[in-house]
Image (tube, grey):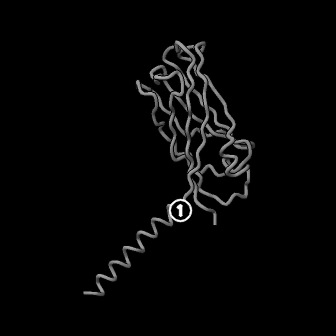
Amino acid sequence: MKNIVLTAMAASAVLVSCGTVQSLVQNTFPYTANVLVSTGVPADKEVSSTATATNVQTWFGGNNNAQIKDVRISDAKISVVSPSGGNLSAFKTIKVYVSSSGTGEKLIASRSNISTNSSSMSLDLNDTGFLDSIVKSSGLTVRTVYELKNQTSSDMNIKVALNFSSVPAK
């Protein structure tokens, strides 16, 4: 009976430690961009805003030898920064693309037929495969494309928050 209890305790410890090790070796790194939606933006017309990633580059510095692999988009959200109390009801669609020097652009997240009065929402992630070459290159660029249902009555500042995940390369 003692052997069964000791074996069960040892197996439990191994399983818990495996989960801990896995969570330690998986990396998640953020990127945020601000998009200004001005009152002059017409409804039913796609508009594009581009931002260069600085915080992702501080993680890897455009280093193709960075010791990470299997980089994927793990989360994408948008939220209204200003005006205070603003919501996303004016938006029809939002698409988020990433690219970098020497790589093609990839659609990583989007949402169509937006019908919310909330000030934030998650975007649907696109299965783009691995983004290693884009994230590890210099000049990571995020392009946000949006279409409004109707013009906004005041300028609106939107935050696009992206999380990428990876595992160590070695």
Residue 124 image offset from top left, x and y in percent = 47, 38
- How far from the left and from the top, in percent, is residue 70? 59, 56
Callout 1, which amino acid? Leu
Question: Element type at marker 1?
Answer: helix
Name above or below for residue 138 compared with residue 2. above
Res 104 seen here: no
User: In this view of the protein, can residue 25 be seen by the observer?
Assistant: yes
Give left or right: position of 103 versus 152. right
Horizontal relation, residue 8 to residue 73: left or right: left
Residue 20 left/right relative to 131: left
Q: Residue at x 70, y 43 (%)?
A: 103
Name the residue: 46% across, 69% down: 18
User: At 58% from the left edge and 21% from the top edge, which residue is drawn?
Assistant: 37
Question: In x, y percent, where is residue 129?
Answer: 57, 49
Circle 1 is placed at which residue position?
A: 24
Badge 1 local density, few (<14 within 10 Å), some, or many (20+)? few
Q: Give percent across and percent down for residue 169.
A: 63, 63
Of residue 16 and residue 89, the one placed in the foreground of this image is 16
Most distant residue in the left direction: 1
Q: Quadrant of residue 158?
A: top right
* The C terminus - image quarter: bottom right
Furthest residue toward front: 84
